[in-house]
Amino acid sequence: MSLISIPPAPTAPSPGRDPEGDGTARDSAVDLIRAACLLAVVAVHALMVGVSVQGGEVVLENALESWGGFTVFSWFTQMMPLFFIAGGFASAAHYRRLRARGVTPSGYVTARLGRLLPVPLLAAMATTCVLAGLSAAGVSPEIVAAAGWRISQPLWFLGVYVLCSALVPAMLALHERAPRLTLAALGVCVMLVDLARHTTGVDAIGFVNLGFVWLFVQQLGFLLADGVIVGPRTAVAALAGGALWIAIGASPMNLFEALNPPTAALAFLGVIQLAVFTAVRPALARLATLPTISWGAAALNGRAMTIYSWHMPATVLLAGALLVTAHLGGDAEAALSRPLSADWWLSRPVWLVAVAIVVACSVAAATRLERRILPGLRFIARPAAARTTLAVLSGAGGVLVILAATGSLTAWLSGAALLAAAIVICLERRQKANAVPSSRP
């Protein structure tokens, strides 16, 4: 018996609304895990923000990096593979529906860029303005740079997701022709890149896996959309593979460290998470029928890009406000608990509640702004492939520029310009009948 059972034809998801916002059927259990993953991402990023005054100097740091329990914590809270699996599930359903209506691959990619880029662009513009304002107000360049870097760190997801979404038509075609072979080929590529990085000691080689790892996990989402059953034996095999990979030194034990660069450990984790989801899917579907749970999942998923784009700027600004308040009180060093101290841990529940409130307010304000600006954007329905490719490279390049320059003010300004250029490339120049209006993110 095969470890992964692949049925001869796709299984239709349960009736409902489209996970991509276009009316395609959606799966309530998948919706629930997407919402849960989003909450987990916000909570983990909030815990990572540490602000203190040490020796008279302001320190803005990743508070969890030196925590002894961080590795074990990562085994249970690293949700990015599951997030990409859910994204692959939604993308397969969305593209198949549009393809049946005659939408070209380039048209699909343009529509995806129209949903993925405008909201982060607004957040990038706001971040640029705030960083410029802090610099003009005389705030230390080191503090401005640290804030810009901390805000920028989650952006890697946007860059990778743009590229993976752009490859959905091609990767889904390969999947429909040879699902096992496509997945196996991607898995082999992931491990070869890891081995090359490990044997040469050149970490830069590992960044090739920004493509292979997340495309592999996206393909798992395609399998889920086809009704694939991933059983316990597959999960055990993946667990053994991940343990071996860590044992030989090809991946860090900490699965957050394994993001940079991504390693095969995340691919193995994706298989394990898919198997666990397969096992608990019926229970999740029942849970999703509860009115409060259903409403909460719909609210989170409906504003997913807004939450993703604004949660880190809001959290860092809250940390800055905490710092200012502590200074106004007189002794900032005594007022702010050092990260990982007993007082710091005791204050984390209050901190998480404060982050939730500030993020919710930021998302509400951003939503009003989006409703005023974004519905007027109209994207070309049948773009040339070269035009779409240029837009994809510009959008992903904007993220790369911000990250490569560690979130400096100049990097944010340049990155926002490239994101804007990607959107402009996709826009319909004139109001034609076949133009595709941008749906609300």
Image (cartoon, rainbow, N blue to C red):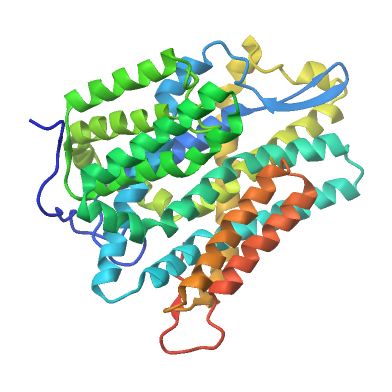
Out of 58 and 408, give the one closest to the viewer.
408
Residue 403 image point, x, y percent: 66, 44
Residue 414 image point, x, y percent: 73, 57
Out of 183 and 382, give the one closest to the viewer.
183
Residue 354 image point, x, y percent: 60, 35
State the count of labels.
0
Classify residue 30 by image quadrant: top left
Out of 2 and 288, give the one closest to the viewer.
2
Q: Residue at x 26, y 75 (%)?
A: 101
Q: Please say whether residue 432 is visible from this viewpoint.
A: yes
> Is residue 382 placed above or below 31 in the rendered structure?
below
> Is 102 positioned to the left or the right of 112 in the image?
left
> Is residue 20 placed above or below 78 in the rendered structure?
below
> Is 211 positioned to the left or the right of 337 in the image?
left
Classify residue 241 by image quadrant: top left
Residue lying farthest to the left in this orientation = 1
Residue 209 image point, x, y percent: 48, 38
Q: Please say whether residue 293 is visible from this viewpoint.
A: no
Q: Residue at x 10, y 47 (%)?
A: 7
> Is 182 positioned to the left or the right of 247 in the image?
left
> Is residue 136 placed above or below 82 in the rendered structure?
below
> Is residue 122 placed above or below 229 in the rendered structure?
below
> Is 421 positioned to the left or the right of 389 in the image?
right
Which part of the image, by quadrant, shows the N terminus?
top left
